[in-house]
Every structure is written in structure tokens, then in C-alpha cells.
Image (cartoon, rainbow, N blue to C red):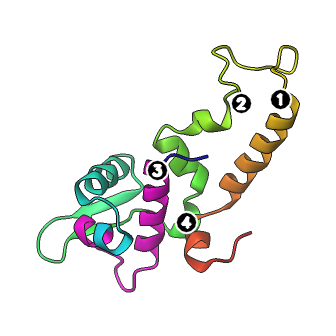
């Protein structure tokens, strides 16, 4: 389904959202807490900071925090930000030219329903939802 990088990012954002107080934590600490390679996570969090989902604070007590409230950031926004939206638009068989209703692969109609439902889940599930375990 989603690649490992996207899962790491979503888990990290939920972890940051669940932090008490100012919600700032260093990349290395987050990586340790979630058993994610630290250098890899640091690079991914920098990308999200450049895209406006996180802010970074340098110095003692620095780290990353959410730039927007967790209840305003959807899973779909993050998936699109990291370039994995192809998952939600591609052909099940990997046809180079997009499957269409008129010229679809053998699984097109079934896959289209699954993709639409998955997109709906990602559009309506926020980072806050991921921290509470209570999904819409």
C-alpha cells in the first residue's frame, strides 16, 4: 500500500502531535522512540518543514513541531506532499497509460472503487485522529 517512508512520516507526525506542551522534539529522539533510522527521518522531517507542515527550532531544546494544528492536517495532504499520490491514481496492473473507464484493465472497475474509498479515508483522517485511535 503506502511505502515505508510515508508510513514513517505519518507515524512521526502523530508522535509529534501527541507530545505534551509545545510539542517539539528532536529528530534523533523521535527516531529512537519509533525505531526509525535517525538520519533518514531527519531528512524527511526537513522536507516536511520546507513544505510548511513542520517548523524546526534550533539550539537547546530544539527540534520539530507541527506548523499547523494536527486536526487540520490530513493523511492525504502528507501523502501528496511526499509524492505518493500515484498510489491513488495508478492502474492496478501498472499500465503506463492511465486506466480509464473506457479502456481499463481487467481489474479497473474493482480497483477504482478501492482507490476511491482509500482516498476518502485519507481525506477524512487527520494527524490528530492518528494520535487518538478514534477514526472518523
Q: Mark 1, residues whose alpha carbon is within 10 Å: few (<14), some, or many (≥20)? A: few
Q: Which residue matches tag 2? A: 92
Give the image quarter of residue 131.
Answer: bottom right
Kindly state the secondary structure of the residue where label 4 is placed: helix
Q: Main secondary structure of the magenta part?
A: helix
122 to 80, vertically: above or below? below
Could you tell me how far apart the alpha carbons at marks 3 and 2 are, in whole angstroms?
Answer: 19 Å
- Closer-to-camera residue (93/104): 93
Mark earlier in primary sequence (4, 3): 3
Mark earlier in primary sequence (3, 1): 3
Q: Are marks 2 and 1 in contact (CB under 8 Å)?
A: yes
Q: Mark 2, residues whose alpha carbon is within 10 Å: few (<14), some, or many (≥20)? A: some
Mark earlier in primary sequence (4, 1): 1
Of labels 4 and 3, the one closer to you: 3
Left or right: where 28 falls relative to 6: left
Q: Mark 3, residues whose alpha carbon is within 10 Å: few (<14), some, or many (≥20)? A: few
Residues in magenta? 4-30
Give the image quarter of residue 55.
Answer: bottom left
Kindly state the secondary structure of the residue where label 1 is placed: loop
Left or right: where 55 falls relative to 122: left
Q: Residue at image x 88%, y 15%?
A: 102
- Closer-to-camera residue (41/24): 41
Of labels 2 and 4, the one closer to you: 2
Mark earlier in primary sequence (2, 4): 2
Could you tell me how far apart the alpha carbons at marks 2 and 1 are, in whole angstroms?
Answer: 7 Å
47 to 45, vertically: above or below? above
Mark earlier in primary sequence (2, 1): 2
Q: Which residue matches tag 4? A: 127
Kindly state the secondary structure of the residue where label 2 is placed: loop
Amino acid at each position: 500500500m503506502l511505502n515505508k517512508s510515508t508510513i514513517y512520516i505519518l507515524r512521526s507526525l502523530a508522535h509529534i502531535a501527541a507530545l505534551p506542551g509545545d510539542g517539539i522534539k528532536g529528530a534523533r529522539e523521535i527516531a529512537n522512540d519509533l525505531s526509525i533510522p535517525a538520519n533518514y527521518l531527519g531528512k524527511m522531517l526537513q522536507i516536511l518543514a520546507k513544505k510548511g507542515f513542520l517548523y524546526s527550532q534550533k539550539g537547546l531544546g530544539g527540534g520539530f513541531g507541527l506548523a499547523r494544528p494536527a486536526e487540520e492536517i490530513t493523511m492525504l495532504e502528507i501523502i501528496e506532499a511526499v509524492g505518493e499520490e500515484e498510489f491513488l491514481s495508478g492502474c492496478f496492473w501498472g499500465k503506463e497509460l492511465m486506466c480509464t473507464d473506457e479502456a481499463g484493465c481487467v481489474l479497473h472497475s474493482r480497483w477504482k472503487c478501492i482507490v476511491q474509498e482509500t482516498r476518502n479515508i485519507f481525506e477524512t483522517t487527520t494527524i490528530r485522529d492518528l494520535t487518538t485511535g478514534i477514526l472518523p
